Image (cartoon, rainbow, N blue to C red):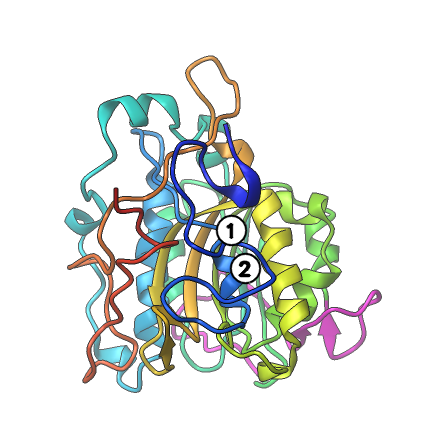
Amino acid sequence: MKGDGGYIVGVPPPNDGGASGGASGGVSGGASVGLMGFPLVNYGGENGAVTRTSEVAESRVSEATSDEATERVSPSDEATERVSPSDEATERVSPSDEATERVNCYISAGVSNEESFTRDFLARFGAMYALNESNCFAFDGTIDAYPVQYTDKITFYKKNIGGAEVDSETETNLRFVLNKYSHVFLKMDIEGGEYPWLLRMSLDDLRKIKQMVIEFHGLTATSSGWGCSYEDKLRCLKKLNETHYIIHAHGNNHSPVVGGIPDVIELTCIEKSCFLDDKGVAVVPPLNTTPLPIPGLDFPNMRWGCDINLNVFPFVSID
């Protein structure tokens, strides 16, 4: 069962898991407080191939944001087969076949000139899930054309992602895609635009995104950093907490760290209905105990700097 604020009953929360004060570890204010009620969980099972790939994809996004990203080597398949939770946890909370074995749409939100994430994902799963230019979409209003050297199996829209109720010639809220597809894999890195977009999305919209790799910006800022107020950042995290679990986190070492919380962080999230027991009943997975970052899977964004240690709550639960 789940307790208040998203914690698992029986696991003590941090000193301050609410929205009214500073989080444990010395964070004074900031939307990082919202993450304290949105802790990382473990996942397991043989059915989670795409789940594991979402983590690989996330580390590729990390690489893609580095200055010399194109020279990096993709994580090996061996790295994706990292140590699973205990057998008991694996049997209890394996992602369901329906959720993990059907991806009927891929979205790349934020392209710039680097799409190794999309290239690698479609190379590995495009044929398996019949993903091509008819159901794969890329969005970026800051470029004139998609960098086709990565893939031509995608339809490009010269539009930014935003939070307007109605789409315009330069912006979309993605509802025209979400109204058609219900098993979506989303990759999003839109430099603060994630907040107005999340504020616009309904819970039903978000539930159609079965797997999400998203970068959040300005999590430790108490002011309107990245064009979004502290209160709205907190609302976004609370909304996402209603529909998804975080299964992996990676701090962007281009950003500062305050009280153990990176100001910019990449999260891999899975929609909650993906976690079922062997009887098909939704369950709450246990909190994550795997140390972060994971060698061979996670890589520093700024390759000449050290990766960010995330071995603190809410990323790793240490008994």
Front residue (pair 250, 208): 250
Residue 189 among those drawn in magenta: no
What predominant SS class does the magenta segment belong to? loop
Numbered range of the magenta stretch = 145-172
Residue 299 coordinates in the image, percent (x, y) = 23, 68
Residue 22 coordinates in the image, percent (x, y) = 50, 67
Q: Is residue 63 above or below residue 78?
A: below
Q: Is residue 189 above or below residue 134?
A: below
| Residue at 40% over, 77% down | 114
Q: Give residue 34's mark.
A: 2
Residue 7 coordinates in the image, percent (x, y) = 47, 41
Q: Is residue 118 visible?
A: no
- Single out the residue that lies furthest toward the right: 166
Q: Give residue 37's mark.
A: 1
Front residue (pair 233, 123): 233
Q: Is residue 302 left or right of residue 99?
A: left
Q: Secondary structure at mark 1?
A: loop
Q: Is residue 32 visible?
A: yes
* Three-letter residue code for mark 2: Gly
Q: Secondary structure at mark 2?
A: helix
Give the class, few, some or many, for how many residues have Cα within 10 Å of label 1's Cα (few <14, many ≥20). Answer: many
Contact flag, marks 1 and 2 (Cβ < 8 Å): yes
| Residue at 70% over, 71% down | 162
* Three-letter residue code for mark 1: Gly
